Amino acid sequence: MNSLNRKLLRDLNLMRGQAMAIALVMACGVATFVMSQSTLTSLKLTQETYYERYRFAHVFAHCKRAPNALAGRIAAIPGVARVQTRVAVDVTLDVPGLAEPAVGHIVSIPDRQGPGLNELHLRKGRYIEPGRRGEVLVNEAFADAHRFQPGDSIVAIINGRRQELHIVGIALSPEHVLQIRSGEMLPDDKRFGVFWMAYTELAPAYDMDGAFNDVTLTLMRGASEPEVLLQLDRLTEPYGGIGAYGRADQTSNRFLIDEIKGLRTMGTIAPSIFLSVAAFLLNVVITRLISTQREQIAALKAFGYTKAEVGWHYLKFVLLIVAVAVVLGTGVGIWLGRGMTQMYTVIYRFPIFYFRLEPSIFALGILISTGAGVVGAIGAVWHAIVLPPAEAMRPEPPANFRPTVVERLGFQRFLTPAARMVMRQLERKPVKAGLSALGIAMAGAVLVLGQFSRDAIDYLMKFQFVLAQRQDMTISFVETCSSQVLHEVEHLPGVMQSEPFRAVSVRLRHGHRAERVAIMGLVADPRVNRVLDIDERSHPMPADGLVLSQKLAEVLNLRVGDQARVEVLEGERPVLDVPVTSLVADLAGMNAYMRLDAVHRMMGEGPSYSGAYLIVDSKHTDELYRVLKETPRVAGVTVQKAAMQSFRDTIRENLMRMQLFNVIFASIIAFGVVYNTARISLSERSRELATLRVIGFTRGEISAILLGELGVLTLIGIPLGFAFGFGMAAFMVSYMETEMFRIPLIVSQRTFAFSATVVLIASLLSGLVVRRKLDHLDLVSVLKSKE
């Protein structure tokens, strides 16, 4: 081992605490990168493999009733590879042990199992047998929520008649990787289940024998999906088709794609922040290390070491820290990636979840972390390279000692000698003090960023389920009903207030852009289910015109006053131009609203309703549930409390676990930053402090000087961290926005308090470590100098 390497190891040993702190900060970035990228790769691989092996359809369409003979004409559409028709209906379920009615989505399957589209994967039990009445397969998520096993039974209201369904198997489908009801925000595995029943039994129950109301297609390679959708719409329109759509708009797949986008964002932004902080720390540490080793650098150059050798020596210091960070971060990242994978196997139902560790992820992680380390230290290393030996032999020029601002203002008499020294040090070296405060601010900012997701989710729940949706439950009808049915609903047990709605499937067009949505027809001034924007302002429904969510308007490039082409996809299918009267900055979905009477005029119909929002007396809910379970016209019931609980459960399982990782990493960063700040200050001022000890200052007094400086920097850094953290959260929100959800920019006082508390605790622990070193300060060796 040559002399420079021995010096390198000695320097690392002397600075092992600081080096390890930096390595831990960098390891957090590497771990986040490896975790998110490996999980992203695994999720995409699993999705693609599952979709391909089980022949997940590319195109979906629903109609009222079409003859099976239409399937041949659909198959003849250019680009269509395969067609599968079926019957799909929503039914009310009476689940044992569940007071409220649940919703079941029953899909027909062939009597005999064979290769088809959206093929089922049996987890338990067997396939249905021909001729056996009432046999069904059930989706695994619903079965797990109720602990159903093959052999159990459940009651469903099928076309107005109670029928006992016998579960013979538990299955998975690529169409329901995430079991979520169309139009809902989140899955509710307890109150929504997917079932599969023999076509020969389900079709006659709905007068569909020899007919279908749902069709799925796969496309040939290179086929034009928009053209296939257009031709499919033309064929199904006479049979009540409500608009074909592609895989990208299929509910389960759409949520999965959003999850993949979120992972990709997390794998980019979070590591960038962590590695940026680590690079900043490396720059500060190497710069100050070089400033304390000026004489050593001069001696090395005087003994014949070249500039390149000296620069490489200090660069190796950085690379060793990076190597430790990569090893630690990769190991932790793999462990966390496996944990994330296991979590996704619970949320997203795949037959098998592949966890793949791509070598390219490791290579890219090493490249990024090494680049961050080198970029952070290159300026300091360059300074060592170009420093002339003669100049390096001279000590740094002393600071410009003059009265501080505090002293010139006459406030020095209120300060102790230690406090005056602290103020002088900060004012005379403002750049160093500013960088130290900036480092502490970055630590606080990362803590704010790690916690703000909880604030955003809490507000999203309050906004969606308390402020906007005030109803206790929502009921939807099998078909649109008259005002007489609404009158009956209002007189159901416990119903205190009702507010009807009319949902109409449409395609909105503006120029060359189009989007398939449902226009919600609401009363003139909604009180139960309100249309709110992010400022919590309620939007009444205009007499004419559309109220659109800003996200939908953005997708269609619409502004207030523009005309939107509305192509109705049901009934008489009118096509008309409707003005956009206002935009709503809401938080979920892409929504379109009109006044109820305006919808009726558009449809050319009298008063008719798709469902109602209800406020219910809690004393009568059980009785109301019993009645609804027996009501043939009711297709589904959504209970608000249940929706909120489902929201909490889903968030707790997913986002809160990610938040825990972020908080742990942010806390490590906070301690690493503050500890390095304290240790560097000690190394720079050790001779000064030792001098004070020799002339009579006590250990407590010199501790007050050093720790007081750290305290002032911490107090400056904390509010700066609040500002930086809020800015980072705003940046994250802009990247996390999807068509399904908009995360509100909400940072609570609790989050700011948490950030400040962790930074203060890190400062206190760092101060205790430094205080202990001050107690063991070797006065003789520190005061030795050549002059």
Image (cartoon, rainbow, N blue to C red):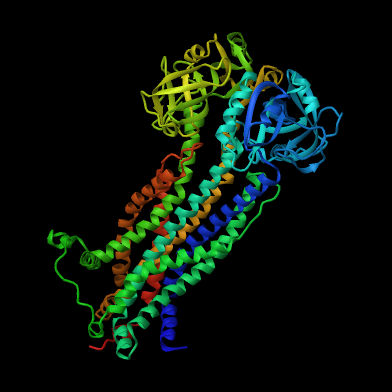
Q: Residue at x 21, y 62 (%)?
A: 415
Q: Quadrant of the C terminus?
A: bottom left
Task: Find residue 493 and report its image quarter.
Answer: top right
Residue 465, image x and y in percent?
Answer: 51, 30
Instruction: Tell me if 161 is positioned left or right of 460 in this view.
Output: right
Instruction: Tell me if 21 is positioned left or right of 332 in this view.
Output: left
- Quick one: 79 or 471, which is closer to the camera? 79
Q: How many marks?
A: 0
- Quick one: 129 or 763, which is closer to the camera? 129
Whether residue 698 appears in this view of the structure is no
Instruction: Tell me if 344 is positioned left or right of 686 in this view.
Output: right
> Furthest-right residue in view?
131
Residue 652, image x and y in percent?
Answer: 57, 44
Q: Quick check: 681 above or below 555? A: below
Q: Quick check: 374 above or below 220? A: below
Instruction: Tell me if 529 is positioned left or right of 726 in this view.
Output: right
Residue 426, image x and y in percent?
Answer: 24, 65
